[in-house]
Image (cartoon, rainbow, N blue to C red):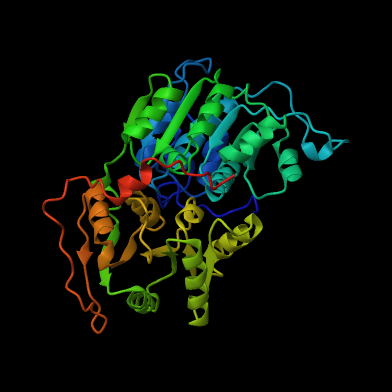
Amino acid sequence: MSDNFEPRGDFAPAMTDASPEAFAPNGFAKMGLAPELLRAVEDLGFAQPTTVQERTIPMALPTGDDGTGHIDLMVSSQTGSGKTAAFLLPVLHTLIANAPATSKPHPARAKTRKFAAAAPRALVLCPTRELAQQVAHDAIDLVKHTRGLRVAHVVGGMPYQLQIQRLQNADLVVATPGRLLDLQRSSQIRLDEVQFLVVDEADRMLDLGFADDLAEVNQLTIARHQTMMFSATLAPRIQQLAARVMREPKRVQIDSPQERHANIKQVLFWADGSQHKRKLLDHWLRDKSIDQAIVFASTQIECDALAEDLQQTGFDAVALHGALSQGLRNRRLMALRQGRVQILVATDVAARGIDVPTITHVFNFGLPMKAEDYTHRIGRTGRAGRDGIAVTFAEFRDRRRIFDIEGFTKQPFKAEVIPGLEPRERAPRPDVKRAPKSRGRFEATRAGRKTTPRAR
């Protein structure tokens, strides 16, 4: 993917005046960020920090005048709230302030293809390839005015030798855990000089079975100065992870599940079966108010079949899931960002990290396996305060999953019907005798089963 990209909603909408004065008195300038970073933020057209940025950045910056004195942070914030810039800006600021006195040659000028092991000063871990690529591109945009500061990303599915070359002299590395440890074990990267470690979407890291990899990275970077962990929730499992890898972290909780996505209209349609759901989806996709949309499928097979079906019906649709080659995934994401594709049919893993501001609708054709994944799905629309619409199609046999989502978000669904496409059965009602927090299928999927990592 190109290093040049459009901003994708990680900051608050711009003020009408993008001059340096627009940063004062409540903008990024008062945080004491490096001038190079302020210029980059201004170039992106953003003046006011989002809530998570306003609360996190000052805490993440060093407390000492000599650039020392960092605290560990646990941050809970919803998807699309601007959390990427909340950790990139303070990390990049400190890297700029503590830049080595000697300049490093660009790897393209090397006379031999035998590279020394890379030794980055900052490391960001992401659960999926798409998220790692997006974070890296965001970082590249933020260092456009900074000389000598290099950013690299390493993910599975990409040419190994090319990634080794890109790692050379990188100050900040964004990676998925699997590929990072592959490179470390083959002595292509050293992690003993890492000063700053960021774990992005820690909840998803655990879902994908990366707990052991995180423990290994923790030991390899044990001398680091600061650890920041970002997660959609501060659930007990996240707090347990934090206790293992952080030193007396401060907590920043931006909102609770019931406060999230207030700018996203959420509606539910009950369906008699898959064919009924397909008719409901077709009706919705013909709505002219849709700019771009993501349709979530439960499996890779369903994803491919649904995308092909939509193509045959005349929609500009493509599938995105983990079984596709990384090159093809990159091309399809680029087509989405460039507006050449209107509908992306995706699985949960592949869609994590997609930040396209023109996505106006999200459709849950297949329900998520866990209730918390629902919030990540609908967060693909309504980015950074924009309005969005999330439509869920559910069969009556899936009512337990719907009740679990309602229990997690503390927001009851508003069930609607489309004239002529009403379900034959009566809509189910919650079982008043059930526990407030379901221990049903969602909990069963977490217990007694170790998930295999899917992003390397």
Compared to 33, does 332 lie above or below? below
From the top left corner, tell me how far across and down residue 211 is, in percent: 48, 34
Residue at image coords 50%, 62%: 300
Q: Give the left or right position of residue 387, taking residue 46 as reference.
A: left
Considering every residue shown, the one lying at the far bottom of the view is: 420
Quarter holding the N terminus is bottom right
From the top left corner, tell me how far across and down residue 349 is, in percent: 48, 52
Residue at image coords 66%, 36%: 182
- Report the front residue among 129 and 426: 426
Question: Which of the 4 image quarters holds residue 161?
Answer: top right
From the top left corner, tell me how far across and down residue 178 is, in percent: 59, 39
The reply to whether residue 26 is visible in this rendering is no
Compared to 302, does 168 lie above or below? above
Residue at image coords 47%, 44%: 451
From the top left corner, tell me how far across and down residue 119 is, in percent: 68, 27
Compared to 81, does 278 lie above or below? below
- Report the front residue among 55 and 129: 129
Question: Which of the 4 image quarters holds residue 374?
Answer: bottom left
Q: Give the left or right position of residue 44, taking residue 267 as reference.
A: right
Considering every residue shown, the one lying at the far left of the view is: 432
